[in-house]
Image: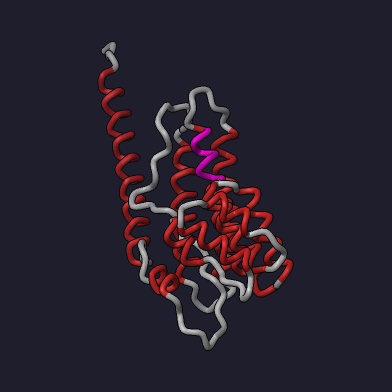
Amino acid sequence: MRAALLGLLLLAAACDGTAEGRAAWRAGRTRDALAAFAGDSPELCYDRALAALELGELDVAERAADEAARADPDFAARRDFLRGNVAFQRSLRAEADAQRPGAPASALERAQADAEDALAFWRRAAASRPDWPEARRNVERALLRLAALRDQRREGGGGSDRPPEPAPGERGPDVPPPPRKPDDAPDAADVAMEEGELPPGQVLGLLELLRRKEAEKRELRRTERGAASSAVEKDW
């Protein structure tokens, strides 16, 4: 995720704060980069949101993304994309809370609600362009995550000492690319992500795998119920 985010930082013309922040980010000093991205320009707000996202400061990332869109409506789609990332991370945290012994049932409900928020934001971002592969892949990731969380809730999940396990093949969501003018050539970060992990065909395969696993679980439960029934002592 760090390499992708680094490639997405925007370089505001004649803006020392951005140049200083990019240098700090490259050196692995994300906290210093976040501090350097102070300012009201949409570019700085957007860079601040990306840095905060990497640090896990989700409220800061959310506010900065909103500020970027308020400063320049052209950032609205990227705001939606980034807020999808924020909601997805909140869902992961809520699921981790739900796995702790004695966790309330509401923790999994919160994880599902946050995943639904991520799905809504990423769908809105995806609808802003004829095709946005990164947003489309993230929509599919959110759908996979929602399916897994619903399974957990049906099965009374939660209260385990184990951390939550990702769905088969699940990887972190893509991050939003920087804005470009229509006549600009794509940069290396955009190309890397459009050729990146979890292409649509693989996602469809994962959905099919989840369906098969669900069918296997149902069959196993039927078998166990049958075995338990046959083991009951008969009085005839």
User: What residue is drawn where x is 34% and y is 40%?
Assistant: 218
**In the image, farthest residue toward the bottom:** 183
The reply to whether residue 120 is in sight is: no
Indicate whether 89 appears above or below 22. above
User: What residue is drawn where x is 44% and y is 45%?
Assistant: 148
Indicate whether 229 appears above or below 233. below
Indicate whether 103 appears above or below 23. above
Q: Position of residue 60 (x, y in %)?
A: 65, 51
User: What residue is drawn where x is 43% and y is 53%?
Assistant: 172
Residue 199 is a magenta residue:
no
User: What residue is drawn where x is 39% and y is 40%?
Assistant: 165
Q: Position of residue 3 (x, y in %)?
A: 42, 60
- Name the side, left or right, on which 236 lies relative to 166: left
The reply to whether residue 160 is in sight is: yes
Specify the color scheme.
secondary structure
Q: Position of residue 203 (x, y in %)?
A: 37, 61
In this picture, which residue range is highlighted in magenta? 90-97
Question: Is residue 210 or residue 22 the one in the foreground?
Answer: 22
Residue 93 is a magenta residue:
yes
Q: Which secondary structure class fits the magenta region best?
A: helix
The quadrant of the image that shows the C terminus is top left
Q: Position of residue 1 (x, y in %)?
A: 43, 56
Question: Is residue 69 or residue 158 the one in the foreground?
Answer: 69
Question: Is residue 216 or residue 198 the one in the foreground?
Answer: 198
